[in-house]
């Protein structure tokens, strides 16, 4: 074979491969036929995070069918250990993954991961547990996909405010003109716990309602801890509790479990959550939860996946993903109550 024919044959083979790969992802070792996306989550037993992972898996399957590219989406969990998560990132990097997605155990520890990813030139997408801005800005290929925590609880306050407007006594049970409330907070240090707690109460106060805090404490996003705290508060405050503001649905469900086991069950306080998980939506349907704020796991997963796939293919940020400040994708929250529940249950 003369040189010309040889080079033409090679060129054609490369062209054919890039067409059949759908995604011409390229690494220094040459053309690859697989897209490898490594995902590390802080815990897999977190209801919200696990539903987001299921959505990610479905998005990957759909893309694989549509594009014909083999997508290796490897989701591992760090069992709440930052050291283990750092090791997982190391093995993704040494395993030639094209993109790494991280749900930080400790959101203040992202600099180490950004640094490693930058050295290997592998884009990194953080999600749900937001790194500090300074860490994200260390590299143009570091991104965050999540939601605006302040908005979630402004909306949570709005659910209470709307119910009060319609029927004040459905919220202010004792009719003293003041809403007595307790707050179940998420894990301390998590951006969503800090902001949600502040903004739900702020919304009530800004809308002219008088409020009195009876108690607040963390239940670390967990249903069992929410139930335990609420049981203590029922023993202490009894019927005085009119509203239970919860930073997520799992803790709201825990509060409802506690109410069901107590004398309050015949005149239960108004309970509101955040997330719109399946069990949360079911609780709105059966009337035990007044409302929730949808933390859109499926749209967040879609943004994470679309961004990962496009970056892995070397195509940069796709048109479907709207970045703000060069690094952030924030999916809007939405109110869910029994009035619009059908739309979300389906
Ligand atoms: C969700 C919680 C979840 C937490 C985990 C929050 O945004 O609302 O349900 O437990 O993220 O990081």
Image: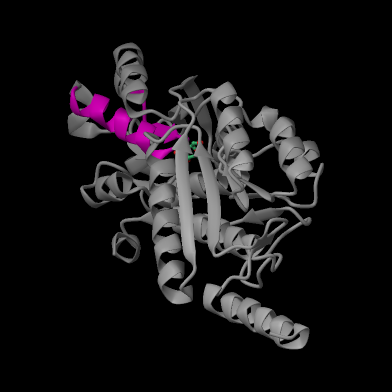
129 to 275, vertically: above or below: above
Q: Is residue 219 above or below residue 4?
A: above
Q: Quadrant of the N terminus?
A: bottom right
Q: Quadrant of the C terminus?
A: bottom left
Asked whether residue 242 is drawn in magenta, I would say yes
Nearest the eye: 238 or 134? 134
Judge whether 149 appears above or below 16 on screen: above
Q: Residue at x 46, y 69 (%)?
A: 63
The answer, for residue 233, to whether it is visible in the render is: yes
Magenta segment: does it hold 15?
A: no
Q: How far across and down, in percent of the image, does residue 322 sit? A: 67, 65
Where does the image place residue 300, in percent across and percent down from the top left? 52, 55
> Left or right of 112: which side holds 245?
left
Q: Where are the magenta residues, as a range? A: 240-261
Q: Position of residue 249 (x, y in %)?
A: 38, 39
Q: Residue at x 32, y 42 (%)?
A: 170
Q: Nearer the viewer, residue 121 or 296?
A: 121
Q: Residue at x 50, y 32 (%)?
A: 42
| Residue 251 coordinates in the image, percent (x, y) | 37, 31
């Amino acid at each position: 074979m003369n040189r010309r024919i040889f080079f033409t044959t090679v060129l054609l083979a490369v062209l054919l491969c890039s067409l059949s790969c759908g995604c011409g992802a390229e690494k220094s070792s040459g053309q690859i036929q697989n897209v490898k996306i490594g995902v590390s989550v802080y815990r897999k037993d977190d209801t919200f995070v696990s539903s987001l992972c299921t959505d990610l898996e479905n998005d990957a399957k759909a893309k694989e069918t549509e594009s014909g590219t083999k997508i290796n989406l490897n989701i591992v969990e760090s069992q709440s250990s930052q050291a283990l998560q750092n090791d997982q990132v190391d093995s993704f990097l040494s395993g030639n993954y094209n993109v790494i997605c991280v749900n930080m155990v400790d959101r203040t520890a992202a600099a180490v991961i950004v640094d490693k990813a930058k050295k290997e030139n592998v884009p990194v997408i953080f999600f749900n547990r937001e790194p500090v801005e300074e860490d994200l800005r260390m590299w143009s290929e570091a991104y965050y996909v999540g939601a605006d925590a302040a908005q979630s609880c402004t909306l949570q306050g709005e659910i209470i405010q709307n119910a009060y407007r319609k029927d004040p006594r459905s919220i202010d049970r004792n009719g003293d003109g003041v809403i007595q409330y307790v707050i179940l907070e998420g894990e301390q240090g998590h951006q969503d716990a800090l902001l949600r707690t502040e903004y739900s109460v702020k919304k009530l106060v800004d809308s002219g309602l008088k409020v009195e805090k009876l108690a607040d404490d963390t239940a670390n996003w967990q249903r069992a801890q929410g139930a335990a705290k609420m049981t203590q508060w029922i023993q202490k405050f009894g019927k005085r509790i009119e509203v239970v503001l919860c930073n997520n649905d799992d803790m709201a469900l825990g509060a409802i479990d506690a109410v069901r086991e107590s004398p309050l069950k015949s005149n239960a306080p108004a309970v509101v959550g955040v997330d719109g998980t399946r069990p949360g939506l079911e609780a709105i349907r059966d009337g035990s939860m007044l409302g929730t704020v949808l933390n859109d796991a499926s749209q967040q997963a879609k943004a994470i996946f679309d961004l990962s796939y496009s970056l892995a293919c070397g195509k940069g940020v796709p048109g479907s993903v709207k970045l703000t400040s060069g690094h952030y994708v924030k999916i809007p929250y939405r109110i869910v109550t029994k009035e619009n529940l059908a739309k979300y249950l389906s």
